[in-house]
Image (cartoon, grey):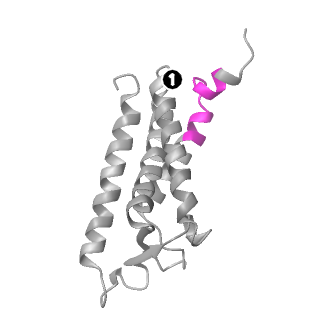
Amino acid sequence: MKKNAIFWIAAIAGILLDQLSKALIAYFLHPPVTTLPILPNIFHLTYVVNTGAAFSLFRGGAGWLKWLSLGVSLGLIFLAWRSPRMPKLEQCGYGFILAGAVGNGIDRFWLGHVIDFLDVRLINFPIFNLADVFINIGIFCLVLANFSPNSVSKKRNSPPQ
């Protein structure tokens, strides 16, 4: 665990934050109150059940999506476990993606759906959760890391000198 410590810290912290936030939303926002305006008509906390993927794509696909989450999670754990020390930004990226995959995977395995609650009404954006945020942060980190000269993926794909 010492080898890619930032990966493990990002993953574990992200999973805990995601699951805690969903538990609090499920506890405090249930019918008849399913939305809480934080900034009225701009940002609300709104409890919704999502049986699909991000933005409710593949609605009703929780059955196969849970296995996809598990596969991605195992692949990322294997990558962190077996890879040499990754650059810090790549560790963050992969760790956050793992947090998102595990966070939504837990919901799919235990509940049969994902709990979404972040409701940005100003731009009429689909309701999402922290796991979705972590996946996007992870992708952003990996894109940034790809521009770094010491990127692991660049080292793997560059010809020997």
Instruction: Give the main secondary structure of the magenta stretch.
Output: helix
Q: Residue furthest bottom?
A: 32
Q: Residue furthest top?
A: 161
Depth check: give the residue in front, 34 or 138. 34
**Residue 28 is inside the magenta segment:** no
The residue under label 1 is: 83
Could you tell me the amino acid type at mark 1? Ser
**Badge 1: few (under 14), some or many (20 or more) residues near its Cα, within 10 Å?**
few
Residue at horizontal 39%, vertical 66%?
111
Secondary element at image label 1: loop
The C terminus is located in which quarter?
top right
The N terminus is located in which quarter?
top left
Compared to residue 90, the image places residue 161 above or below, namely: above
Residue at horizontal 43%, vertical 70%?
116
**In the image, residue 71 lies at what x, y percent?**
54, 44
Compared to residue 72, the image places residue 133 above or below, namely: below
Compared to residue 132, the image places residue 24 above or below, namely: below
Depth check: give the residue in front, 13 or 38. 13
**In the image, residue 80 lies at what x, y percent?**
47, 30
Left or right: 160 with respect to 72?
right
Instruction: Residue 46: tell me if it is visible.
Output: yes
Depth check: give the residue in front, 151 or 97. 97
Compared to residue 12, the image places residue 26 above or below, namely: below
Depth check: give the residue in front, 149 or 103. 103
**Residue 153 is inside the magenta segment:** yes
Instruction: Give, as a single range, the part of the protein colored magenta.
Output: 142-155
Left or right: 155 with respect to 66?
right
**In the image, residue 157 lies at what x, y percent?**
70, 24
Instruction: Residue 44: tell me if it is visible.
Output: no
**In the image, residue 159 lies at what x, y percent?**
75, 16
